[in-house]
Image: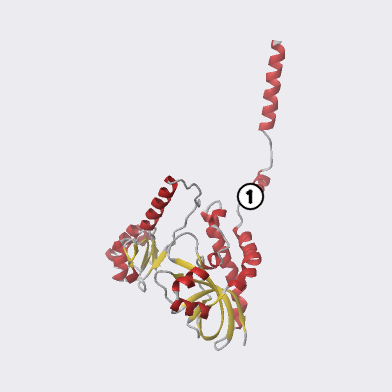
Amino acid sequence: MESLLQANPDIDAVFCGNDAMASGAYQALVAAGKNKNVKVFGFDGTEDVVNSIKDKTIVATGMQFPKVMAQTAAAYADEFFKGKRIFPKKMPVAVELVTQQNVDDYIGYGKKE
Amino acid sequence: MRLFKNILIVVVIMVVGWNSVYFAKLDEMKASKALKEFDAGKYANEFWNNTLIPNLDKAVDIQELVSLMKTDEKKAFDNYSNALGIGNLKYFLVRGTAKISYIDNDYITLDNNTTIATEFIFGNAVRDASGLIDINDFVNTMDFNNVSAEINKIIRAKVLPSFKGNVKSGDTIEFTGAIELNKQHVQLNNIEIIPIQLKIVK
């Protein structure tokens, strides 16, 4: 992130491939004194970044639902062991955008129950 | 006998060798390979003309949908939503008539508490709202996602320009489009409609 900032001092936003990178990018922006001017976006929906969105330091993240994925995989495995053999080849899991407007609906890696 | 065997082996090797090697022009090979690759633009156009538009009569009136959401949310989702796979995001084909309250660079705001997106046409709402495309028909997910991108291009190129050029605040319009609602946290204020058909009535 430091070298990216040196090469592109006038960037407006950073979209990161995961939330750990987003946290790191934000720290680098703080160190460079640019955290107020550059918007940071993450992806995954970790607890740290959900809290950062509440604190208005990170703008948004794409919430994945690893628990839903794990539960679905386990349920399918159970059905397989019980004899079912026909399953969809692909099963998309919807990714939700967590922003400052809706962050109160979310916790780390999921929705508030 | 041995000579015959050797001749036979040589003949077999020549036949196999001859059939294993052939020459073709590189540009012809590239062209034929391109033909076999999935053409998301073509697929999206065919889907738009042959599947989506003929099925728009299945769109639910947005006021009717909002009313049903308030009284029987489950029935509203069960009867009218579509989605791929699992998760809370569900898509609806909607239609309606409304008066334009105001127009800005990104949206047209209607007097029925909804907006029509006119600048940022992204996402999978239109592809998934009809429930007529199955992800398992696609060899890879990138092709499937490109179909969405191409559908959104059609909206930007064919649906919006003439409409945006003529519409003004106060006009009454008829619209058909797709919306996304989160099943676990339904927000009925300011529903965003991705347009499929737009018509100025007066």
The image quarter in which residue A111 lies: bottom left
Q: Residue at x 43, y 49 (%)?
A: A79
Residue B105 visible in the snapshot = no
Q: Position of residue B18 (x, y in %)?
A: 69, 29
B162 or A90: nearer the eye? A90
Q: Is residue B196 above or below residue B47?
A: below
Q: Position of residue B134 (x, y in %)?
A: 55, 58
Q: If the image is split into quadrants, where does the C terminus of chain B sit?
A: bottom right
Residue type at mark 1? Lys
B135 or A99: nearer the eye? B135
Left or right of residue B183, residue B164 in this image: right
For numbered disc 1, what is the local secondary structure? Answer: helix
Left or right of residue B21, residue B179 in this image: left
Tally of numbered discs: 1
Q: Is residue B100 above or below residue A94?
A: below
Using the image, name the chain to which the residue with label 1 belongs.
B
Q: Which residue is mark 1?
A: B36
Q: Residue at x 71, y 22 (%)?
A: B11
Residue B36 visible in the snapshot = yes
Q: Position of residue B113 (x, y in %)?
A: 47, 82
Question: Quick one: label 1, few (<14), some, or many (20+) residues within 10 Å?
Answer: few
Looking at the image, which residue sits at the far front? A82
Left or right of residue B91, residue B166 in this image: right
Q: Position of residue A14 (x, y in %)?
A: 38, 64
